[in-house]
């Protein structure tokens, strides 16, 4: 969904940034080895995301939430805040939030952070002395709030995946978990790797497909 708003995906960018593979700048090992390089990467991502605006798909989901309230569980792998900009109030970011940071040492809660640390020497520090890192689930880390996600999967009657490749775990397996008790729908420009797990799918850009598809649900 975010790609339609001008935020490049890792796969769409060829998995490279300045000739670095993404895993080389988005992992605990990278943070230990070269935190300045990591912040340079996430500062770039913040600048790009700050220029992006929600598209029709984001607004369609926000409108659906207004009708369904807490019966809609919106879980995203995207780390931008476009869902929130569109008006969604209940968003679970399983891979973290780009505009938040946290200490890599103490238990201080994540906090809003829109700074871009452009100069390599600018490694922000916490009051405890720890380094401030992006509030992102890096390669090799466990996604956030999996207990809440699995509970929602157990309870859901309709599961919809939008724009996913069907490759990245554990999200790629969510559809298989609900397949026995829920209607499963895929929406996206390309067929995902796990397409056979869905009971129906709608090929096309989310910004073009979702407004009509969800509009039918909002009107019912």
Image: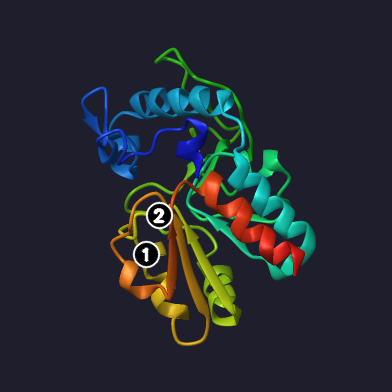
Dots 1, 2 in contact, CB < 8 A? yes
Residue 16: x and y in percent read 25, 32
Mark 1, Cα crowd under 10 Å, few <14 / some 14-19 / many 20+, is some
Residue at x 45%, y 38% (from the top left corner): 3
Q: Which mark is residue 164?
A: 2
Circle 1 sits in a helix, a strand or a loop, which is it? helix
Query: In the rendered image, which quarter contains the C terminus?
Result: bottom right
69 is higher (above) or lower (below) than 130: below
Residue 202: x and y in percent read 45, 60
Residue 18: x and y in percent read 26, 22
Circle 2 sits in a helix, a strand or a loop, which is it? loop
The residue under label 1 is 172
For the question of whether residue 130 can be seen, the reply is no
Residue at x 44%, y 12% (from the top left corner): 119
In the depicted view, which residue is nearer to us: 173 or 215? 215
Direction from residue 86 to residue 52 in the image, left or right: left
Direction from residue 49 to residue 38 in the image, left or right: left
């Amino acid at each position: 969904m975010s790609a339609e708003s001008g935020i490049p995906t890792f796969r769409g960018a060829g998995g490279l940034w300045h000739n670095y593979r993404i895993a080389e700048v988005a992992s605990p090992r990278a943070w230990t080895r070269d935190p300045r390089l990591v912040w340079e990467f996430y500062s770039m991502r913040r600048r790009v995301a700050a220029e992006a605006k929600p598209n029709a798909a984001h607004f369609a989901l926000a409108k659906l939430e207004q009708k369904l309230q807490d019966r809609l569980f919106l879980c995203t792998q995207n780390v931008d805040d476009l869902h929130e900009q569109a008006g969604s109030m209940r968003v679970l970011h399983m891979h973290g939030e780009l505009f938040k940071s946290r200490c890599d040492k103490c238990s201080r809660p994540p906090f809003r952070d829109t700074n871009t640390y452009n100069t390599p020497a600018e490694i922000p520090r916490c009051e405890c002395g720890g380094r401030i890192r992006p509030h992102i689930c890096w390669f090799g880390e466990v996604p956030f709030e999996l207990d809440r996600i699995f509970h929602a999967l157990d309870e859901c009657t309709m599961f919809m995946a939008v724009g996913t490749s069907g490759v990245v775990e554990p999200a790629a397996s969510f559809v298989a978990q609900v397949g026995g008790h829920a209607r499963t729908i895929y929406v996206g420009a390309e067929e995902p790797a796990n397409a056979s797990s869905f009971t129906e799918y709608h090929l096309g850009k989310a910004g073009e497909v979702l407004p009509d598809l969800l509009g039918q649900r909002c009107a019912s």
